Image (cartoon, rainbow, N blue to C red):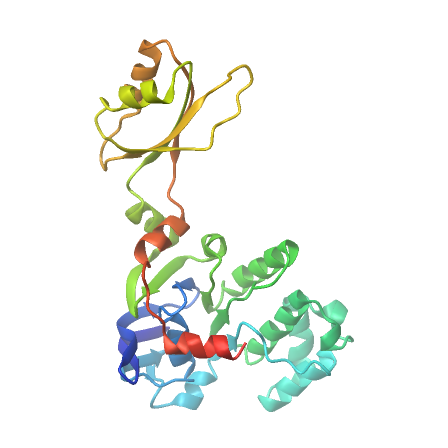
Amino acid sequence: MIELSHVSRTFGAFRAVDDISFSIPSGQIVGLLGPNGAGKTTTMRMITGFLAPSSGTISIDGTDVADAPIAAKRKIGYMPESAPLYSDMIVDDYLRYVAAMQGVDANAKVPSLAGVCGLTDVMHKNISELSRGYKQRVGLAHALMQDPEILILDEPTNGLDPNQIIEVRNLIKEIGRTRTVIVSTHILAEVEMICDRVIIISKGKIVADSPTEELRGHFGRRMTLRLTVGGCTRDELVCALSSVRGVGAVKDANSTQIRGEAHPISLMLSVDEDEEPRPALFRQVVDRGWTLYELAVQTSSLEDVFRALTADTPVDPGESAKEATR
C-alpha cells in the first residue's frame, strides 16, 4: 500500500504540491491526472524517491520512504514516458544486463518477462530496430524486473498507434490484477478504460479522488439534452422551450441529417439539477404538430469533469523540468 500524508513540495517560493493525502491499496489501478503544471509529475517523483517532500510523509507498506529509501525503491517499478533504453543493445542482452544490475536471476526472469510483455518474437533484435510500441514493452519489462509491488507508468501509450495502444492497455490491466499501478496520462479515454480510480490534481491540490464511474456521476449530475425537431423555425422552437420548467441555456448543435426533412433544428439544452423536463418537451413539440426526431441525454464524460476541475492551473517547475529533458 502507498500512503501519502499531508505531503507538500516547494521549489523556492513556489508550492508545486500543497498538502495532499491519499492511500492506494494493492491490486488497484489508479489514474493520476492533472494538466501540465498541476503537480502530478512532482507527486510521482516523490513517491519513487527521486524527490524528497518538503513536508509530510510518504510510506510504503507502513514504512516511511525517508527512513528506508533503498527498501522502498525495491518495491517500485517506474517507467518514464521516454524509457531510457540502450538502443545499440539486443533486447535479450539489455534485459539480462538489467537483471544483473538488480541482482536478479536472468535465466529465470528474462524469459518470463518476455512472455508477459509480449517480447518473445523480438528478443533477438536490436532495440534501435524496434517500433515505439515494442520499446515501451521493453521499458515495461525493465520496470517489472524485480517483480515490484508498485508500478508507476508515465504516459505509457504516448506515441503508439491504435493497435499498440490496445495491446499496452490490456497488458496494464493484466498486471494490475496483482499490483498497485499508478498511471499518469493525458488520454482521458484511456483512464476510463483501465483505471479503477481517478485522482485529479490541480494547482498542487487534490480536487477529486473517486472511483471512475462515481466521479462522472458526482460531478456530472447536471443533465444535458440533445433535441432535434422538424417542421418549425429555430425561433419558434426556442420560444416553445422557454416555457418548460428546468430548461436552462440553449445552444445550437450540429444539425442531424434526416431524409425528407429539409431543415431540422438541433439544439443542446442544459437542465437544472433534479429537474426532468423530457415529458414537457415532448408535449411542446407534439402539440404544435412538429416532428420530434431526437430527444437524448448527453452523459458527462471524464473529459467534462477534468475541464471543470482543472481550469487556470499555474506552471509547476517539476513539469517544466520534465519537458526540458524530452
Would residue 299 be found to the left or right of residue 109 on screen? left
The vertical placement of 171 against 249, above or below, is below
The vertical placement of 137 against 207, above or below, is below
Which residue is more in the foreground, 275 or 109? Answer: 275
Q: Residue at x 32, y 18 (%)?
A: 236
Which residue is more in the foreground, 147 or 67? Answer: 67
Locate residue 59, reporting x and y percent: 33, 80
Q: Quadrant of the C terminus?
A: bottom right
Q: Work out which residue is located at the far right of the displayed protein and give it.
A: 124
Which of the 4 quarters of the picture holds residue 123? bottom right
The vertical placement of 300 against 71, above or below, is above
Locate residue 174, reporting x and y percent: 55, 61
Which residue is more in the foreground, 22 or 40? Answer: 40
Locate residue 193, reporting x and y percent: 49, 53
Locate residue 213, reporting x and y percent: 37, 49
Residue 206 visible at all: yes
Q: Residue at x 37, y 9 (%)?
A: 289
The vertical placement of 282 against 94, above or below, is above
Would residue 71 be found to the left or right of residue 258 on screen? left
| Count of numbered circles in the view | 0
Q: Quadrant of the N terminus?
A: bottom left
Which of the 4 quarters of the picture holds residue 299? top left
Residue 148 visible at all: no
Would residue 189 be found to the left or right of residue 51 on screen? right
Which residue is more in the foreground, 22 or 32? Answer: 32
